[in-house]
Amino acid sequence: MLRLRKEDTSLYLYIKDIALKPYIEFQEQEGLIYNSILSSSASKVYSINSLATPNPFEAGRGVVYFDDNFDQTLVNCTTYSGSMEQSNRVIVYDELGIVIPDSDYIVDYIDGRIITSSNVNPTTVDFYWNYASVVDEWPDGAAAVAPVVVIDIGGTDKKGYQLGAGKLINRKCSLHIFASSAAERNDLSELLYDSLYLKSCPIYELPRGSVLDFDGTFVGRKMSNDKSTNLFSRETVSGTGNLLFDNVSARNITLPLTLPKGANDVILSSLNAYRARITFDLVSYTEA
């Protein structure tokens, strides 16, 4: 994984896990539906039947995978350099309303599924989810429901930082905000601006990739039920400092009701009705 991808992922995690904490919602006693198509003799899959709006399992949302305080984990007086999978943000109940131990199932945080190979009968679930969608690609108006935050790294400049080795890296970045109302747009814009202005975030080494595997489960969870060994590594890139946010600026975007001639005068979707953009420089240093 090259440096740009590490910076992009680190920025994504900062926006999703730190900046947008106030936009985490709670769903209680949602039903679980047995999914016979995805189940097998080795494991049973149950899908969360949520009626929340927007859909908690649309792109960029999903179930929250860290507890509220996800600093380094202390186990048996040994500090592990990483963050443990959540332990109190997903609670699964059986048909009698009894809590099922989390060692009896794993969670697909992206698609909202409970997967178990034990002789248990998951029936309902309490869970926390990300109300604001965070993506790194332009949203499809037919599929996305506001609020959506798009992270866009649009360009890179590098220059010598000192005599000898070492470069100062400056990347031009934008956060595009799509909201459902002017009030929501203003709140998101102000919150994200304050999360960037005079702030910084770590550059993670990501030796095991991001927090979730390709199937939405917490990294390493399928190999062990011991959460103290299934840690998202927060090891940082050596020989460098944090990612600094510089020249932060926020502006609302007002679009015409129709597109210019030549675009068939298509009326803009509601996704574009309340927009804002935050621009900033993502500044870091490397010894190489």
Image: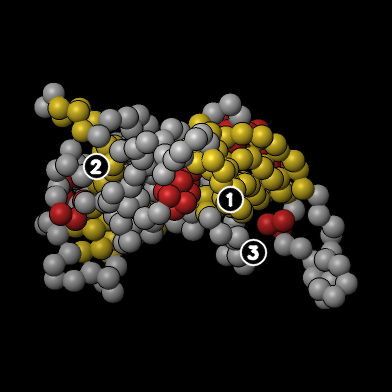
- Circle 1 residues within 10 Å: few <14, some 14–19, many ≥20: some
**Which label lies toward us, 2 or 3?**
2
| Circle 2: element type | strand
Residue matched to label 1: 156
**Residue 151 visible to the viewer:** yes
Q: Which residue is mark 3?
A: 141
Q: Residue at x 52, y 50 (%)?
A: 134
Query: The residue tagged with tag 1: helix, strand or loop?
Result: strand
Q: Who is closer to the viewer here, 166 or 175?
A: 166
Residue at (59, 48) in percent of width and height: 157
Residue 181 occupies which quadrant of the picture? top right
User: Foreground: 30 or 228?
Assistant: 228
| Numbered label attached to residue 217 | none
Quadrant position of the C terminus in the picture: top left
Relative to 218, residue 80 above or below:
above
Separation (CA) of disc 3 from disc 1: 28 Å
Q: Circle 2 sits on which residue?
A: 231
Residue toward you, 268 or 196: 196
Q: Is label 2 in contact with label 1 (beta carbons under 8 Å)?
A: no
Q: Residue at x 75, y 53 (%)?
A: 273
- State how far apart marks 2 and 1 are (Cα): 32 Å
Q: Earlier in the sequence, mark 2 or mark 1?
A: 1
**Image coords of residue 122 (percent x, y):** 23, 53
The nearer-to-camera label among 2 and 1 is: 1
- What amino acid is at disc 2? Leu
- Furthest-right residue in view? 261
Earlier-in-chain disc, 3 versus 1: 3
